[in-house]
Amino acid sequence: MGAKATRVAFGEALTRLGGENPDIVVLDADLSKSTMTEQFAKKYPDRFFDLGIAEGNMVGAGAGMALAGKIPFICSFACFVTGRFEQIRMSIAYTRANVKIVGTHAGIGIGEDGYSQMAVEDIALMRSLPNMVVIQPADAVETERALEYIVRHQGPVFLRLMRQKTEDIHPPDYRFRLGKGVVLRPGKDVTLLGTGGVLANALKAAEILAQKGAEAQVVNVPTLKPIDREMISEAALGHGRIVTVEDHGITGGLGSAVAEVVAELGRGRIRRVAVEDFAESGNPDGLYRKYGLCDENIAAKALELLGE
Amino acid sequence: MDIPELKAIAKELRVDIIRMLVEAGSGHPGGSLSCIDMLAALFFHKMRHRPHDPHWPDRDRFVLSKGHCVPALYAVLAKAGYFPRDELLTLRKLDSRLQGHPDRHRLPYLEASTGSLGQGLSIALGMALAGKSAQKDYRVYCVISDGECQAGQVWEASMAAPKFGLDNLCALLDYNKIQLSGAIKDIMDLEPLLEKWRAFNWHAVEIDGHDFAAITRALDEAERTKGRPTLILCQTIKGKGVSFMEGRWEWHGKAPNHEEGERAIQEILAQT
């Protein structure tokens, strides 16, 4: 198994796809060394535009380029780009502009830089817009496949990427399907629904649960919107025990999206593992333990449901 | 189209704006009347566009960043033949394509959805950038308001456009000096405004925004200017053409009633 950050996989795949599709243009806000658009910029300097530290203008410029027929990728840290919510709401979403919003450095897993650079509200914001698709790949192969889809998709997309390396959890022949969860491990007692890098911890939690005699199903949810209602319904109406796991705030992310479906079904119980406070500087593993995104806490939440 | 014709058309358009707003019962007459002359000059004199082929890829683009003044744009589009003039009276009504602020999804002849001030120039910049990078020769025009120059994003866009040498971008600033709750100079003064744009490396010229000869000259000058974008600072009068609205902030966002509308139309028609 290799380990690569999804932002790195994105930078490589974007450069490859840029060679296949001349309509792809990339806009960045002085972070191309971190968002990994630098490789594209070097290869296609005529299709790369650095707009400086002015993300609001980047959102609008991206919309304008889309309206003129381009496929713009507007890239920055997830907190900075989705922080321009009003511009995204009007200039991209309401306008139905075919803009691909790429937010890297998602979640508290970025570590030492601390809260100001951590996106933990971005899924909630983007999910609230009627026509916005929200995708968070969990590893390199999924990033590449998802990006191929995103280029083909007509309409705005928010792609959420991680700074830190993640282990491959999908096979090389993995196929991305919009709005579909991916079963990573079968199990009949409880379902752990995770998205992004924390899936590694969900898989470890399933091991802990196995030692305690409980079979946990682990499902990757790469599409936060539209959410996979069918897969949630299956778990809720079956064994009825769901734990959501995400490196995002507890309000408005995967946990909320799943809870909305569960509430409408009127069946099943849910526990949400997510970030519940402003986080802080520290190493990613330490942060995941302190803020409850670690395998022990995920297993503990599952055991709560199994014990009830 | 020559200047007497443009004047005659502007008169008709002003009447249409008043009729629409009376019928809608709400909307923004002051800024619609202050920008209508520049819109008329653009759509009936300067811009290359095809009402029968609205998505012609080489058309010049127009973005109305001051989206609340969209009655002016609807009047122009109807007059140009994009949609039937009768439809103007559906403004702001349920199921109408003519939303209170521009929605290009409902009315595809609009180039952008605007109304949240400060964003239109960035969109226009993106269109100009796309045109440049594809070696297209279409031009992009954007009408911005004076009040929205209080928003930082306008200056983000103004900083970016010269960097990319966007001489295919021309912004017209409708400087009527009044915003929703009072005078610009009292709420957040913009002066020295022309100098600000020049300091941001734009080719910036100042004109009487109701003088068609001056507007068309400035638009020609903008097209001749190479290597950087042009800003036309249009000195205008809020509510221009209706004496009881002129220069009064109360008419920023209030529709005339039937009696006021009749008076306004009679006044406009009586002008030479």
Image (cartoon, rainbow, N blue to C red):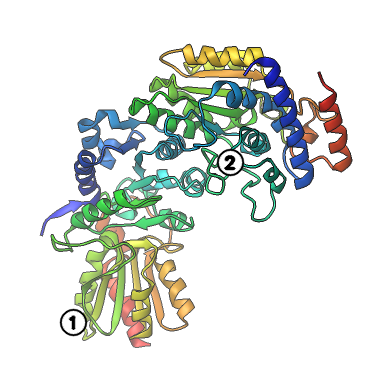
- Amino acid type assigned to the residue bearing label 1 in the image: Gln
Quarter of the image where one finds residue A277: bottom left
Q: Nearer the viewer, mark 1 or mark 2?
A: 2
Q: Give coordinates of residue A308: x percent, y percent.
A: 38, 87
In this rendered view, identify the residue nearer to me: A100 or A139.
A100
- Residue at x 28%, y 75% (from the top left corner): A299
Q: Rounded to the nearest whole Å, what is the CA distance between mark 1 and mark 2?
A: 56 Å
- Residue at x 59%, y 37% (from the top left corner): B117
Q: Give coordinates of residue A5: x percent, y percent.
A: 21, 51
- Amino acid type assigned to the residue bearing label 2 in the image: Ser
Q: Would you say B47 lies left or right of A8 here?
A: right
In this rendered view, identify the residue nearer to me: B169 or A11.
B169
The residue wearing badge 1 is: A211
The residue wearing badge 2 is: B116
What chain is tagged by disc 1? A
What chain is tagged by disc 2? B
Quarter of the image where one finds residue A202: bottom left
Give the quarter of the figure containing the C terminus of chain B.
Answer: top right
Residue A62 is marked as: none
The correct choice, above or below, for B221 with respect to B177 in the image is: above
Identify the element where label 1 is drawn.
Answer: helix
